[in-house]
Image (cartoon, coloured by chain):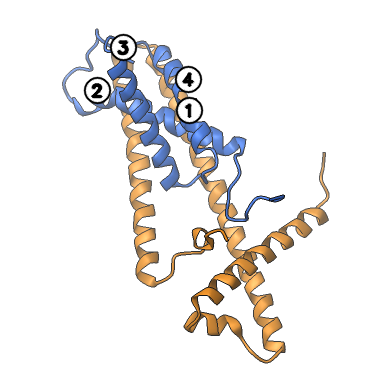
Chain colours: A blue, B orange
Amino acid sequence: METRLHYQLGETWPRFTCHWIASCFGHFFRVLLPIAISFPSNARPEAFPRWWSVLIFAACTSVLSAVINANLPVTARELVKSMAFGFALSTTATIILPGWTG
Amino acid sequence: MADISLNTPSSGRRARELGRAVDKACWIVLLSVIVVVIVGLVRRAHFEHSYAVAVIIALLGAFILVVGLAQQAIAARDLDTWRMMAEWQLRAAHDRTGHNPIAQANSADEDQARYYALLSDMLIEDMMVIHEDEVPHGN
């Protein structure tokens, strides 16, 4: 078929970027949830990864979810799916790499 | 033939209300996740000051997401306007010929409703292409 069917959304860079950011948020959510809910106790000063290592890892793994979700519109519903994807990738990484804290 | 119902708006008041409720719930989840991330980073920044950079990056990311959401909302509103114009043209054309298939479709024939949904989408696409051609590009 020459043209795309009218109900299919194409992949665009703004969509890719938004879903990539949402997926990174999902990744950071998994990492930072223990700190956020442990209030008012301390934020575990010692056993915690550097922010840039978390960011680089999240950015790399989120490319996968961004590539898959790049044809979804940028709405709250679809961004929640990307966040869940980022959360899942982060959790998968911690299962596969037990020593990895980021 | 491909399933046209993928793109037709869900029919019925109850379905639309449910859709809106889910949209609002997703908004709340989205904002909660962003707030939890930023709060976690701020709390961590008390112990490790370099996390302040991460807070700034997270705020920037949240801002970009909000801008993207706003642009999408504007695009959706524009598409609604195009759809209204297309439906108005269809209705006017059929009023001239003496019958109104859209009204019939609403009441009885589901296939016909789908056909007119598809037709109005095609009209919108055509109108948008013409509109883009008319607007002079700066670059």
Query: Horizontally, is A91 left or right of A42 in the view?
Result: right
Does the residue at mark 1 contact the one at mark 3 (Cβ under 8 Å)?
no
Residue B56 in the image: state x and y as whole percent.
45, 23
Question: Which of the two discs, 3 and 2, labels the residue nearer the N terminus?
Answer: 2
Q: Is residue B43 above or below residue A25?
A: above
Q: Chain of mark 1?
A: A
Q: Which residue is mark 2?
A: A35
Q: Chain of mark 4?
A: A
The local crowd at label 1, few if under 14, some if 14 to 19, many if 20 or more residues have their Cα within 10 Å, is some
At x 53%, y 74%, the residue is B111
Q: Is residue B90 above or below residue A94?
A: below
Q: Chain of mark 3?
A: A
- Mark toward the viewer: 2 or 4: 4
Q: Can the viewer see residue B38 in this picture?
A: no
Query: Horizontally, is A42 left or right of B33 in the view?
Result: left
Query: Horizontally, is B61 left or right of B48 in the view?
Result: right
Q: Which residue is mark 3?
A: A100
- The residue tagged with tag 1: helix, strand or loop? helix
Q: Which residue is mark 4?
A: A60
